[in-house]
Amino acid sequence: MISATDFRKGTKVLLRDEPHVVMDFQHNKMGRGGALVRAKLKNLISGSTFEENFRSDQKFANPDLERRSMKYLYCDGDLYNFMDEESYDQVSLNKENLEDVIGYLKEQEVYEMLFFRERPIGVTPPLFMVLEVKETPPGVRGDTAQGGATKPALLETGVTVQVPLFVNEGEKIKVDTRDNTYIERV
């Protein structure tokens, strides 16, 4: 059981029979009454966020979440197919379930999938991915007085990131998937 006073950013709790993650929290001690915890929560199934007050002695169950490594196989219309590398079970997800990850789906890449009661509820890409630059304007030396200038580059998965002027089409770059930033040329 998780107490409301144990809330931290990233804590996962079971509320109204659905898993939620604590986005932000604040402890408030009232003059005579008990303490309250104001928390901003995100529903892991629907993605909706809301704020709610909880008594400090309120307890929550720990959601039974399971993480599995799944390999992305292919896209079939609106369905994206993944395979568990241990059991070879296949899972298909809609585009709505993959909104945050859709720009980083690459065939034969391994992703971490979150399950709640044997139902997939989320996909996390690797922290860093090596992707090929498909389209970028040529960088001209002398475009900047200070150096450090960037230009947009369209990658093989369809996501656009800012890269230094020396990066050209056809090169592979390493990208941080958390904030869509260029790390290095590979």
Image (cartoon, rainbow, N blue to C red):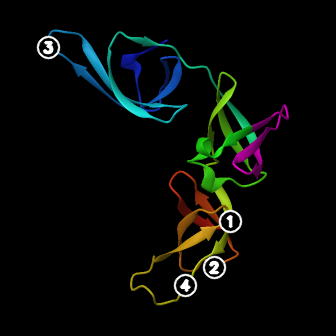
- Verify CB contact (< 8 Å) between mark 1 and mark 3: no
Counting residues from the start of the chain, the first of labels 2 and 4 encountered is 4
Give the distance between the C-alpha atoms of the residues marked 3 and 4, in whole angstroms: 63 Å
Badge 3 element = loop
Bin the neighbour count of mark 3 within 10 Å (Cα to Cα): few under 14, some 14-19, many 20 and up.
few
Depicted 41 relative to depicted 95: above or below? above
Which part of the image, by quadrant, shows the C terminus?
bottom right
Counting residues from the start of the chain, the first of labels 4 and 1 encountered is 4
Residue corresponding to mark 4: 139
Give the distance between the C-alpha atoms of the residues marked 2 and 3, in whole angstroms: 63 Å
Q: Nearer the viewer, residue 139 or 17?
A: 17
At 19% from the left and 9% from the top, the residue drawn is: 33
Give the distance between the C-alpha atoms of the residues marked 4 and 1, in whole angstroms: 19 Å
Front of the two marks 4 and 1:
1
Residue corresponding to mark 1: 156
At 68% from the left and 53% from the top, the residue drawn is: 105
At 73% from the left and 37% from the top, the residue drawn is: 69
Q: Is residue 90 magenta?
A: yes
**Rendering quarter of residue 71:** top right
Q: Magenta residues: mostly which secondary structure? A: strand
Q: Amino acid at mark 2?
A: Asn
Q: Amino acid at mark 4?
A: Gly
Residue corresponding to mark 2: 168
Residues shaded magenta: 71-91
Give percent across and percent down for residue 23. Answer: 41, 34
Badge 2 element = loop
Give percent across and percent down for residue 52. Answer: 33, 24
Front of the two marks 2 and 1:
1
Give percent across and percent down for residue 98. Answer: 61, 45
Give the distance between the C-alpha atoms of the residues marked 1 and 3, in whole angstroms: 58 Å
Depicted 138 relative to depicted 64: above or below? below
Residue corresponding to mark 3: 31
